[in-house]
């Protein structure tokens, strides 16, 4: 066994997540932040961490009012780190092997209605005369909603990922897994309009990036989030990019799409993850029944 200090091990683990497991930059950053916060709280050598120490750390998080989802992520980060450290023989035993995270109550995602999404698109479309930024913004909104893709997936798109002939978009998702998602006519039109003015924003750092920022480089996720929040606020139901992903999946199911097809479009590894949208649709049906049925 060769035990290293926290800093050296955490740096090596970051590299393992990025290069060995091919996790996204955002995921690596989140795990890294959780593990460094844990390290600061535990204040002991890696080899001195035990299950009771970790349980004390979790109890502190609960007492501080941390959200259940946040604690679950931190537990996942800790378990992954200590399992790796044990496998690499940096520590003798895995103290997190029997650590359990609190159960999370099932909370349905906030989903804007179809009318809200249309009004968000229309509010952005009304700005098209303002120049290439407004044209870019509409294209990003249409692609996010049409493809149900994640913000990181949108930002990593390249020009050659658009298949105009078949109306498909090649997306690289979590774990570098590739999938093709269909684009409707509005998204294809918006993309064509954006690519026709893309050169006005392009610069030395543009490369093959499909969507560009004001300085000509690849679009930043923070910019995409701001654009989506502003547009959906104007549409009457403010959400972020993930809210558009939720909306797309829910609206597909409400329109009669089968669960497996929606799973494939979203890039979910398990259909169980996709099933949450069936609950959203069912809840909407119940709400409509309660509001409109005379015997509700």
Image (cartoon, rainbow, N blue to C red):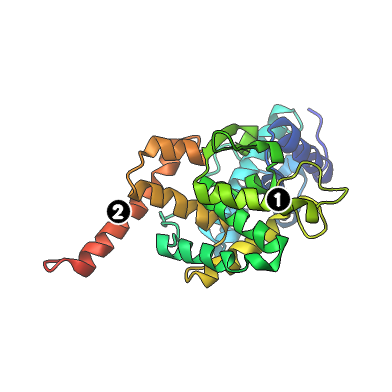
| Location of residue 79 in the rendering, given as x and y in whole percent from the top left corner | 62, 40
Image quarter (top left, top right, bottom left or bottom right) of the N terminus:
top right
The quadrant in which the C terminus is found is: bottom left
Say which residue label 1 marks.
Answer: 196
Is 252 in front, or is 1?
Answer: 252
Foreground disc of the pair 2, 1: 1
Q: Does residue 151 lie above or below 13 as drawn?
A: below
Question: Which residue is identified by label 2?
Answer: 282
Tell me: residue 286, above or below residue 184: below
Mark 2 crowdedness (10 Å alpha carbons): few <14, some 14-19, many ≥20: few
Q: Secondary structure at mark 1?
A: helix
Point out residue 126 in the picture as x, y percentages from the top left corner: 58, 68
Q: CA distance from mark 2 to mark 1?
A: 42 Å
Residue for point 44% across, 48% down: 249
Question: Closer to the N terminus: mark 2 or mark 1?
Answer: 1
Say above or below: 154 vs 170.
below
Residues at discs 2 and 1 in contact (Cβ within 8 Å): no
* Residue 156 appears left or right of 278: right
Q: Position of residue 62 (x, y in %)?
A: 55, 61
Residue visible at 33% across and 53% down? Answer: 281
Q: Residue at x 70, y 50 (%)?
A: 196
């Amino acid at each position: 066994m060769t035990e290293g200090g926290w800093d050296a091990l955490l740096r090596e683990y970051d590299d393992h997540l990025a290069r060995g497991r091919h996790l996204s930059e955002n995921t690596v950053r989140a795990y890294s932040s959780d593990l460094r916060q844990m390290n600061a709280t535990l204040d002991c050598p890696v080899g001195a961490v035990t299950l009771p120490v970790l349980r004390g750390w979790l109890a502190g998080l609960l007492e501080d009012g941390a959200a259940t989802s946040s604690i679950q992520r931190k537990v996942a980060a800790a378990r992954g780190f200590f399992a790796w450290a044990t496998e690499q023989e940096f520590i003798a035993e895995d103290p997190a092997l029997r650590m359990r995270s609190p159960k999370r109550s099932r909370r349905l995602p906030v989903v804007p209605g179809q009318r809200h999404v249309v009004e968000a698109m229309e509010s952005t479309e009304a700005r098209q005369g303002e120049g290439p930024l407004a044209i870019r913004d509409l294209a990003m909104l249409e692609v996010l909603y049409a493809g149900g893709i994640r913000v990181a997936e949108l930002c990593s798109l390249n020009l050659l990922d658009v298949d105009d002939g078949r109306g498909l978009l090649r997306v690289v998702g979590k774990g570098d897994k590739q999938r093709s998602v269909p684009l409707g006519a509005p998204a294809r039109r918006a993309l064509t309009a954006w690519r026709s003015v893309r050169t006005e924003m392009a610069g030395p750092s543009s490369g093959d990036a499909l969507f560009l920022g004001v300085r000509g480089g690849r679009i930043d996720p923070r910019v995409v989030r701001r654009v989506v929040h502003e547009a959906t606020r104007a549409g009457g139901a403010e959400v972020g990019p993930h809210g558009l992903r939720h909306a797309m999946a829910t609206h597909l199911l409400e329109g009669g799409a089968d669960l497996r097809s929606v799973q494939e479009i979203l890039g979910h590894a398990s259909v169980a993850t996709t099933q949450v949208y069936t609950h959203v649709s069912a809840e909407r049906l119940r709400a409509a029944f309660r509001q409109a049925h005379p015997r509700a």
